[in-house]
Image (cartoon, grey):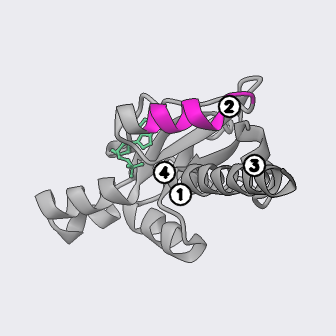
Amino acid sequence: MTVASILKEKPDRLISVKETDSLGDVANVLTRENIGAVPVLDTSGQMIGIVSERDIVRQIAREGGAVLTRPVSSMMTKTVVCCAPEDTVESTMALMTQRRFRHLPVRSNGRIIGMVSIGDVVKRRVEDAEREAESLRDYIARG
Ligand code: AMP
C-alpha cells in the first residue's frame, strides 16, 4: 500500500497558510479544519515551512499569548521532511516514528499535493491487518 492510496480517500484540497499569517490565524485554521499541522507557502505558492499545533503550544508556554500576533514565518519549522505518493505506508510510518513528527507533506514533481498524518497511516495499517486476518480466516475455513 502506498501514500497515494491514502490520499485518494481524502478530500482533494490542500489546506495551507501564508507566511504573513499570524500564529492566531494559523490556530484558527487548525481549529476550523480539525487538523494538526499546515504547510506554510510563500507568495509564489512554494512551501517554505510547516507549523503544527505543538509549535503554537510551545511558543505560548515560552512567551505568552502575545505570540499569537506574530507572523508564522518567525516560528515555523523551515526544514520540512516530505514523502512521495509512491512511498509505502510502512516506510512513511517508520519515518514519522524515527523523526518524531506526526505530519508529512506529500511532494510530487516539486509540488505539495497533500498531507498525511500519523492518524491516516495507522488507520490504513489497521485496515490492512484486518483484511489480511479476514482472508486468512476464509482460507482456513475453506480447508
Ligand atoms: P508534529 O508531531 O507533527 O505536531 O510536529 C512536531 C514538530 O515537528 C513541530 O515542531 C513541527 O513543526 C515539526 N514537524 C512536523 N511535521 C514535520 C515535517 N514533515 N518536517 C519537518 N518538521 C516537521
Q: Amino acid at mark 3?
A: Leu
Labels 4 and 1 touching (C-beta < 8 A): no
Label whose residue precedes the other's in the sequence (2 or 1): 2
Q: Quadrant of residue 84?
A: top right
As helix, strand or loop, the secondary structure at mark 3 comes to helix
Q: Which residues are magenta?
A: 86-96
Label whose residue precedes the other's in the sequence (4 or 3): 3
Q: Amino acid at mark 2?
A: Arg
Which residue lies under the disc numbered 4? 20
Q: Amino acid at mark 4?
A: Thr
Residue at 78% over, 44% down: 5
Query: Separation of disc 2 and disc 1 at Cα?
Result: 19 Å
Q: Nearer the viewer, mark 4 or mark 2?
A: 2
Above or below: residue 126 compared with residue 42: below
Query: Separation of disc 4 and disc 2 at Cα?
Result: 23 Å
The residue lying toward the viewer, choosing from 74 and 10, is 10
Q: Residue furthest left?
A: 62
Residue at 39% over, 38% down: 97
The residue lying toward the viewer, choosing from 136 and 55, is 136
Q: Quadrant of residue 59?
A: bottom left
Q: Main secondary structure of the magenta part?
A: helix
